[in-house]
Image: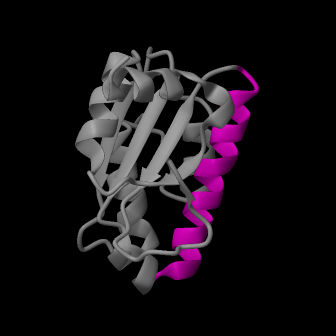
Amino acid sequence: MDELDRVADRLRKASGAGVYHLPQDGGAAIAAAAAAAGLGVAHADLSDCRDKAEFLRRVAAALRFPDWFGHNWDALADCVSDMSWWPDEGHVLILEHADGFRIAAERDFLEALEILGEAAGDWATQDVPFWIFVGLTADGVAHLRRF
């Protein structure tokens, strides 16, 4: 079994899903493994993202949220807990270049990760994987697990 197959097998398992530090090799390897696993993949580039409103806009675009998305934390929680507009067997959200958002709006950054993590836990109870990978150059971010 090669590396792609091993990662794809891991991504298929909802029990381990949650919020993780994006591996150093970046989102390409994760996206390829997710596609091989039959999971939907969304990329949100957070370069120059400095506030909650911009974060919500970029995630909404990446995940193709419906028009009723309210651009607030409750609406984010509602949408990532539904995902009915994505027919895939599970989901991978890659948040690239998140350092600026984390530094500029740390409280909002942590709130976003909490909401996404809770959604991943809720999906896991239905045996649906929902993985979130956060691209940070800073090492030792205590609230992110390593994949």
Q: Nearer the viewer, residue 75 or 81?
A: 81
Residue 130: percent from the left, percent from the top? 55, 34
What residue occupies the far right of the structure in this picture?
Answer: 125
Q: Is residue 88 above or below residue 72?
A: above
Q: In the figure, is residue 139 to the left or right of 123? A: left
Q: Is residue 120 shown in magenta?
A: yes
Residue at 28 percent across and 46 percent down: it is 27
Q: Quadrant of residue 127?
A: top right
Q: Is residue 80 above or below residue 135?
A: above
Magenta highlight range: 105-126
- Badge count: 0
Q: Quadrant of residue 3?
A: top left
Q: Main secondary structure of the magenta part?
A: helix
Residue at 51 percent across and 39 percent down: it is 131
Residue 103: percent from the left, percent from the top? 42, 84
Residue 56: percent from the left, percent from the top? 42, 58
Residue 132: percent from the left, percent from the top? 49, 46
Residue at 38 percent across and 68 percent down: it is 136
Q: Is residue 8 above or below residue 78?
A: above
Q: Is residue 59 shown in magenta?
A: no
What residue occupies the far front of the structure in this picture?
Answer: 1
- How was this image coloured? one colour
Q: In the figure, is residue 95 to the left or right of 109? A: left
Q: Is residue 3 above or below residue 74?
A: above
What residue occupies the far bottom of the structure in this picture?
Answer: 104
Residue at 56 percent across and 39 percent down: it is 80
